[in-house]
Amino acid sequence: MDEGPREAPALFMVPGVPGSVRDFRYLAPQLSDAVRVVRVDLPGFGGSAPVDDAVETFPGRARVVLALADHLGVSRLSVLGHSMGGGTALALASRHPDRVGLLVLVASLALSRHRGLGLPPRAFRLLAASFSVPGLRGWLVEKSREAYRKRRFPGAETLDAAGFAVQLRAIGAADYALMRRAVRGPLPPTILAYARDDHMIETHLSEELARALPHARVIAFDEGGHNLQKTRARELAAAIREELARR
């Protein structure tokens, strides 16, 4: 979804897992009068078909975002990543500092496993493979639906075995070693926003990420939960506008 003036600075918004362009339906309108906002459906989500490398790795997803920028004729971009989308955004910014002018991390996964993930990434990859076993498929679908309902994730009632397998493979892409390498830079100017009442990512993990990004502009909300792009859309938009005005 491509919104806003074509000649304006471009901000690519990358959702978490599961997620889609709808995740930014509150934040995008706060910016699109003066910013070209490109909301991204990553492969396997929303209206985008799955591509193995982009489903299973942060660098693969980063390449997809960069390819979309190339397709749209955007040579210089800013990138915002929410939740697991922060891994994609950080991979893109660290590997292509010549292309990325601003990095925005919103309720991003950090440098080690957070409570929302529940299991190690490799466990999600194994679970995804288990959906191909006929005797387990039906039971796994029901258990996955229960887990999605509990976490208020979209798709609990509509995803089938293949759909859940793609999403679990995508969750299994969480790569904390990559995150720890990427924060060592070089990185563009960075905004890091998190809430202390985030039920998915512990405050101490967000604080650890902030310490690893000493030059970042850190915005710590007492309240706002995990979906700051919804609950704190105005504050995030104001910070993004300020940073883009400096570029």
Image: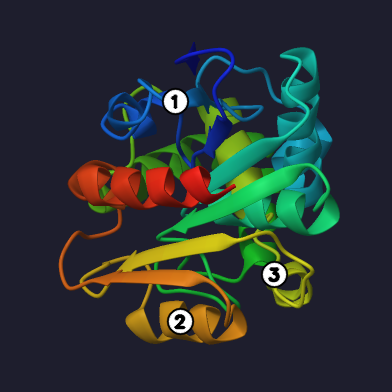
Q: Secondary structure at mark 1?
A: helix
Amino acid at the residue labelled 3: Met
| Pointer 1 with pointer 2, Cβ within 8 A | no
Give percent across and percent down for residue 206.
43, 77
In the foreground, 49 or 14: 14
Q: Which mark is residue 205?
A: 2
In the foreground, 173 or 196: 196
Q: Which residue is at a point 36% across and 33% down the rendered structure image? A: 23
Q: Which mark is residue 21?
A: 1
Image: 86 above or below 63:
below
Give percent across and percent down for residue 169.
66, 46
Residue 132 in view, yes or no: no
Rounded to the nearest angstrom, the CA distance separating label 1 from label 2 is 26 Å
Image: 13 above or below 3:
below
Q: Which residue is at a point 63% across and 35% down the rendered structure image? A: 166
In the foreground, 159 or 232: 232
**Sequence-first disc among 3 and 1:** 1
Residue matched to label 3: 179
* Residue count near mark 2 (Cα–Cα under 10 Å), binned few <14, some 14–19, many ≥20: some
Amino acid at the residue labelled 1: Val
